[in-house]
Image: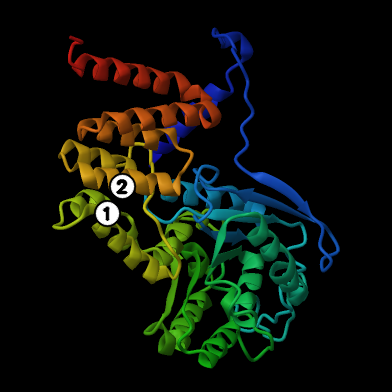
Amino acid sequence: MRLYFRHILMALLMLQVSPTAWSGSETSVKPLSFASEIIFSSSFLKNPQNIHIYLPQGYESSAEHIQYPVIYTLDGWALSRSVSGVVNHLGNTASMPKAIVVAINSDDDHAYGPSLYTSKSGWGDDPTVKLDGFSGGQSDIFLSFLKDELIPYIDQKYRTNDFRILIGMSPSATITLHTFWKEPELFDAHFAFAATDVIGMGYTPDSTIIHKLAESLAKNPDRKGYLYVASAQREADKNPIRNENIASLKKALAPYTGRNFRLRAEHIENFGHYPMVLPGLLNALDLVFPRADWDTGTRFSNILALPGNAKDNLLSHFEKLSQQVGFTVRPNPDLKRNANSLRVASYRLRGQKRYAESEQLYRLWIKDSPTSPKAYAGLSATMEASGKPELALEYSEKAVALAKKHSPDSLALYKKRLTDLHTRLASKKPASP
């Protein structure tokens, strides 16, 4: 661990080196934007909300029928880039479905929590004390903003499916937990970080949020959903009632966790109040998208080796994943340095001379990414290998046309491939009499 942080320190020092020590030359500066920013004026909230929207890699090139789950984060200042970074990494490594991240950056998040008492939170010895500075009681107004304004806007503007996750931390975790029971159909999963004290707070001095969560599930015992609650272990060490809160939560929700509902509540070692978000987020996502099922590893290769048709076997696997989460999950068309994609699978099938199956996967890739020159170039190679030169030329020309419009930086590559293809096919023609 010390060596790890030493490397980080050295990297930071390199970044802070004085201008006179820099011997290179700056050739160009290109600003990069990984998120869209909107200032959202609400009819429910007094102040406009600053919203950051992170789209998954490949969103622009994917077909209209490809839809994405949406992860909403409160406390954008603490969660937006960490959540979008982790989700982007897992999505780009075939470890979870790619997703849209919507971060709400609000200066009023304390005001938007429900009005709560200390109850069994460990915030002092008097359960009748109201936490006015922690939660301002405007939670239902904020819920109206989410339900009637922000979510409809995101669903209209972007290709979303019906699966949503809400994430809050510390004070904004009260909003997440309030939403769980107040609007049970609005989100499929709720992540509450730094919140093992929060679940012990109550709407009355003699109750806790745990009671509200259990009451909500009792009304719909077959409800499908996910709840993750966690805090730093060092906070539980200072305030042992947090351990009691976790035990109470698990006991209260136990009648429902054996059905469609999934719960994970824990304290995380060796991370503080804010840093626990990172391991907590991985554990929360594992609750929804279990790594045993989603982190495919060599699974694509294993599927290709199964008896029967490769496309049918592959789609059968993803149909099982889709049933698990309740929305359609598609194979990743193209992942960098990752074999668990249609690009590598179709290439390997061609190498095994399974040309018809290779063609099927390339066409599946084209269906999901119709503007990809790489997909058409690969299909051209399969057509050439299977003895269909006319189709090979047609698809290679299509790759050039798409590169010209959508990927100009790679245009020279596809032009060269087309020229080389013409040369190879010409050399195979019989000489004229």
Q: Quadrant of residue 15?
A: top right
Q: Are marks 2 and 1 in contact (CB under 8 Å)?
A: yes
Q: Toward the viewer: 154 or 63?
A: 63
Q: Quadrant of residue 415?
A: top left
Q: Quadrant of residue 316?
A: bottom left
Q: Residue 337 in the image: x percent, y percent?
A: 33, 37
Q: What residue type is disc 2 on?
A: Leu
For label 1, count other residues whose C-alpha is less than 10 Å away and answer few (under 14), some (14-19) or many (20+).
Answer: many
Residue found at x 59% / y 80%: 184
Q: Residue 233 in the image: x percent, y percent?
A: 46, 64
Q: Residue 17 in the image: x percent, y percent?
A: 57, 18
Q: Which residue is mark 1?
A: 311
Residue found at x 57% / y 10%: 21
Is residue 22 positioned above or below 256 on the image?
A: above
Is residue 171 positioned above or below 255 on the image?
A: above
Residue 361 has which mark? 2
Q: What residue type is disc 1 on?
A: Lys
